[in-house]
């Protein structure tokens, strides 16, 4: 079994960005309660008034073999919770952080996709999964850079 490197990388990225506050949401399986996402993040907007934006992020890693891998849509179990969170307030956002991990971060593709976009893709896609090649086309607008040291560029969460 391969360890999930994406969550470790995402935590490191949050700590590296002073403009965002975030924490990993932990789950106690004995409580029979699921968490809606892996991370909760907040950012502040200073306009005519101060707004606090809350962001949920669910991380999904696809471990590639020979440069190929696929994300099975049945793994997106938090879709409903993320959509519900986003619908509650215009100050709520939800995203999937999807990584096609290929031995090292500089070989990998990482996307931060708004839940509504991912939901539309899942519902319109003819297959039950998204392979790496199709993701590079379908999710190209949501691709993020992985900086030196395995830090994800989280600027898309600050828009």
Image (tube, rainbow, N blue to C red):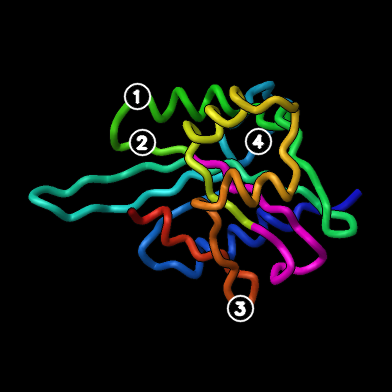
Of circles 3 and 2, the one toward us is: 3
The residues tagged by marks 4 and 2 sit, at their Cα atoms, a distance apart of 21 Å
Q: Position of residue 38 (x, y in %)?
A: 59, 42
Q: Secondary structure at mark 1?
A: helix
Q: Which image quadrant for residue 150?
A: bottom right
Q: Secondary structure at mark 3?
A: loop
Q: Which image quadrant for residue 110?
A: bottom right
How would you classify the magenta stretch by its main secondary structure? strand
* Earlier sequence position, callout 4 versus callout 2: 4
The residues tagged by marks 4 and 1 sit, at their Cα atoms, a distance apart of 23 Å
The residues tagged by marks 1 and 2 sit, at their Cα atoms, a distance apart of 7 Å
Q: Position of residue 2 (x, y in %)?
A: 87, 52
- Taking the spot 91% from the left edge, 48% from the top edge, the residue there is 1
- Taking the spot 46% from the left edge, 53% from the top edge, the residue there is 22
* Earlier sequence position, callout 4 versus callout 3: 4
Which segment is the magenta one? 95-109
Q: Residues within 10 Å of mark 4 (few under 14, many from 20)?
A: some
Q: Residues within 10 Å of mark 1 (few under 14, many from 20)?
A: few
The residues tagged by marks 3 and 2 sit, at their Cα atoms, a distance apart of 30 Å
Give 148 or 10, whichever is nearer the viewer: 148
Q: Which residue lies under the disc numbered 4?
A: 27
Q: Is residue 25 visible?
A: no
Q: Which residue lies under the disc numbered 3?
A: 148
* Earlier sequence position, callout 1 versus callout 3: 1
Q: Position of residue 94 (x, y in %)?
A: 46, 38
CB contact under 8 Å: marks 1 and 2: yes
Task: Answer above or below: position of 158 versus 38.
Answer: below
């Amino acid at each position: 079994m391969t360890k999930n490197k994406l969550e470790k990388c995402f935590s490191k990225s949050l700590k590296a960005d002073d403009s965002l506050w975030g924490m990993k949401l932990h789950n106690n399986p004995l409580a029979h309660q699921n968490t809606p996402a892996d991370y909760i993040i907040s950012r502040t907007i200073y306009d005519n008034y101060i707004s606090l934006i809350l962001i949920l992020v669910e991380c999904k890693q696809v471990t590639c073999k020979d440069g190929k891998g696929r994300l099975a849509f049945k793994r997106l179990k938090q879709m409903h919770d993320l959509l519900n969170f986003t619908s509650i307030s215009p100050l709520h956002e939800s995203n999937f952080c999807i990584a096609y991990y290929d031995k090292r971060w500089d070989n990998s593709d990482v996307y931060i996709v708004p839940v509504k976009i991912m939901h539309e893709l899942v519902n319109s896609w003819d297959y039950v999964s998204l392979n790496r090649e199709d993701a590079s086309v379908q999710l190209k607008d949501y691709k993020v850079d992985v900086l030196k040291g395995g830090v994800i560029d989280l600027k898309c969460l600050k828009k």
